[in-house]
Amino acid sequence: LDITFLVMPPSPSVDAAIRRAFIRGQRLCDRIVRCTVTVTHHEQAAPFHVTVTIAVPGRAIAVSNDPFRDNVYAALSEAFRAARRQLQDHVRIRRRQVKAHAS
């Protein structure tokens, strides 16, 4: 797990929230090779942007919260929720639990 804070000082509480969200993702897939989280703070109306990149064998998942959020925890939640959905889809495909469409 690699956590980067851009244009803002590192926050222990945000760091802890990221680690908790990462652990939830590990419960879905134990084959996570790397996870990179970037938290960016802008001085605009909706200042927080979170990017999550997860590498698993055979795939890289990259998501971010869109639109930007005023609350860093809401931005984290949104980005990790999108990453977990894609990770779940990846796990289902790897386990062959996805139905094939008729051609």
Image (spheres, rainbow, N blue to C red):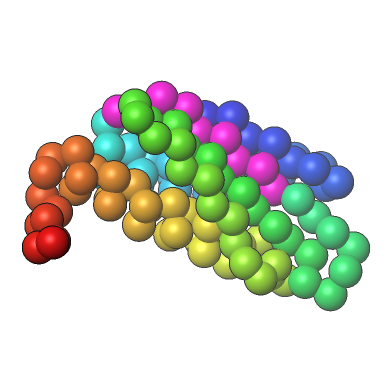
Residue 28 shown left or right of residue 35 in the figure: left
Q: Which residues are magenta?
A: 31-39
**Residue 52, percent from left and from top:** 55, 45
**Side of 46 relative to 100 (left or right):** right
* Residue 38 lies in the magenta stretch: yes
Instruction: Decide which of 46, 9 is in the foreground and name it.
Output: 46
In the image, what residue occupies the spot 44% across and 52% down? 83
Q: Which image quadrant: the C terminus? A: bottom left
**Image quadrant assignment for residue 33:** top left
Q: Is residue 50 above or below residue 46?
A: above
Indicate whether residue 92 is drawn in magenta: no
Compare residues 12 and 3 and report the one nearer the observer: 3
Please give the name of the residue rendered at 47% of the width and 27% of the height, measured from the top-left corner.
34
Give the left or right position of residue 39, taking residue 20 as reference: right
Residue 21 coordinates in the image, percent (x, y): 44, 48
Residue shown at the point (53%, 57%) measured from the top left:
79
Quadrant of the rendered image containing residue 85: bottom left
